[in-house]
Image (cartoon, rainbow, N blue to C red):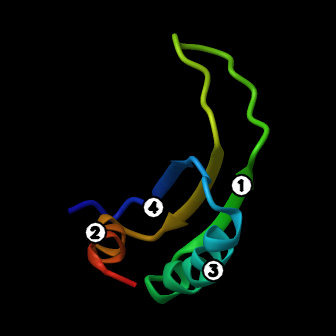
């Protein structure tokens, strides 16, 4: 596995804002557990390339290694 810092991007369609607020509270804690750092999120992205504009929220964070990303992704928190 790589020792290069890993940057993660998620595209989320929020259908229930109240339910998502609960998820969001836990999300930041889980990325910190795996040595991650939150970068940014945005609900108003600008479409520059490609066929389909992105809809929903874009969330970006980083973790030190692929192993940290894989461990974070395999948790059920």
**Label pair 1/4, CB-CB below 8 angstroms:** no
Residue 11, how many percent across, how many down?
Answer: 54, 46
Q: CA distance from mark 3 to mark 4?
A: 28 Å
Q: Give the mark, 1 or 4, whose residue is nearer the N terminus.
A: 4
Q: Quadrant of the N terminus?
A: bottom left
Q: Residues within 10 Å of mark 1 (few under 14, many from 20)?
A: some
Q: Which residue is mark 1?
A: 41
| Residue in the picture at 53% in, 64% down | 62
Single out the mark in the foreground, 3 or 4: 3
Q: Height in image: 61 above or below 22?
A: above
Q: CA distance from mark 1 to mark 4?
A: 19 Å
Q: Which residue is mark 3?
A: 22
Residue 75, how many percent across, how many down?
Answer: 31, 80
Single out the mark in the foreground, 1 or 4: 1
Q: Which residue is mark 2?
A: 70
Q: Give the mark, 3 or 1, whose residue is nearer the N terminus.
A: 3
Q: Give the mark, 2 or 4, whose residue is nearer the N terminus.
A: 4
Q: CA distance from mark 3 to mark 1?
A: 16 Å
Label 1 sits on a secondary structure element that is strand
Q: Which residue is mark 4?
A: 5
């Amino acid at each position: 596995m790589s020792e290069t810092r890993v940057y993660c991007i998620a595209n989320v369609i929020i259908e229930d804002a109240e339910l998502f607020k609960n998820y969001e509270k836990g999300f930041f804690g889980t990325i910190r557990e795996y040595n991650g750092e939150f970068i940014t999120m945005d609900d108003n992205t600008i479409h520059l390339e490609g066929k389909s504009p992105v809809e929903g929220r874009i969330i970006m964070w980083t973790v030190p290694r692929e192993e940290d990303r894989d461990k974070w992704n395999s948790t059920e928190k």
